[in-house]
């Protein structure tokens, strides 16, 4: 578990650095969950991303890539191999190169949300 905590502590800042322009809905020792202030047709906020410490891995969710899969164009095969579903990446070890790539992807996702008017 200690190794997974290190993974979580390495991934958490990738989302946390954008918290000022997003809405923090969960900020707990094992998860950080961010929404936008934009309300969808169902009157619920639009999800941006989350990082969660699970039992066997750490998950990093990034909703912009679900809405705009073209954001994934050009990502490395190694990062794509970490994908679970359409907008989640799972990690068991600290991987600085992939985390740097994920930070760039997160920033691109935030820029996409801003272009779409989801950030207010």
Image (cartoon, grey):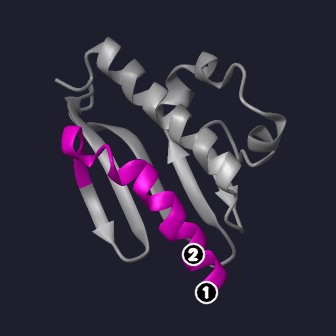
At which x and y percent is residue 44? 25, 38
Distance between the Cα atoms at labels 2 and 1?
6 Å
Quadrant assignment, res 100:
top right
Q: Is residue 19 magenta?
A: yes
Residue 6 has which mark?
2
Q: Are marks 2 and 1 in contact (CB under 8 Å)?
A: yes
Query: Is residue 1 in sight in this rendering?
Result: no
At which x and y percent is residue 29? 37, 77
Q: Is residue 2 magenta?
A: yes
Would you place residue 26 above or below residue 74 in this image?
below
Name the residue located 50 percent from the left edge and 23 percent from the top edge: 67
Name the residue located 24 percent from the left edge and 53 percent from the top edge: 24
Query: Is residue 93 in sight in this rendering?
Result: yes
Name the residue located 41 percent from the left edge and 56 percent from the top edge: 13
At which x and y percent is residue 82? 75, 49
Name the residue located 45 percent from the left edge and 50 percent from the top edge: 14
Q: Secondary structure at mark 2?
A: helix
Quadrant assignment, res 114:
top left
Would you place residue 3 above or below residue 89 in this image?
below
In the picture, measured across the screen, residue 102 lies left or right of residue 22, that is: right
Q: Quadrant of the C terminus?
A: top left
- Viewer-nearest residue: 23 or 15: 15
Residue 31 has which mark?
none
**Magenta span: chief secondary structure:** helix
Residue 2 has which mark?
1
At which x and y percent is residue 56? 69, 75
Q: Which residues are magenta?
A: 1-24
Q: Quadrant of the N terminus?
A: bottom right
The image shows a total of numbered marks equal to: 2
């Amino acid at each position: 578990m200690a190794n997974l905590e290190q993974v979580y502590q390495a991934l958490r800042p990738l989302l946390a650095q954008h918290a000022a322009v997003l809405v923090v809905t969960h900020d707990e020792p094992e998860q950080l969950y961010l929404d936008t202030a934009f309300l969808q047709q169902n009157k619920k906020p639009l999800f941006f991303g989350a990082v969660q410490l699970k039992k066997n891995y750490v998950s990093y969710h990034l909703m912009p890539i679900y809405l705009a899969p073209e954001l994934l164009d050009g990502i490395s095969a190694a990062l794509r191999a970490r994908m679970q579903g359409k907008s989640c990446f799972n990690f068991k070890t600290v991987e600085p190169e992939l985390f740097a790539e994920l930070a760039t992807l997160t920033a691109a996702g935030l820029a996409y949300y801003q272009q779409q008017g989801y950030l207010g």
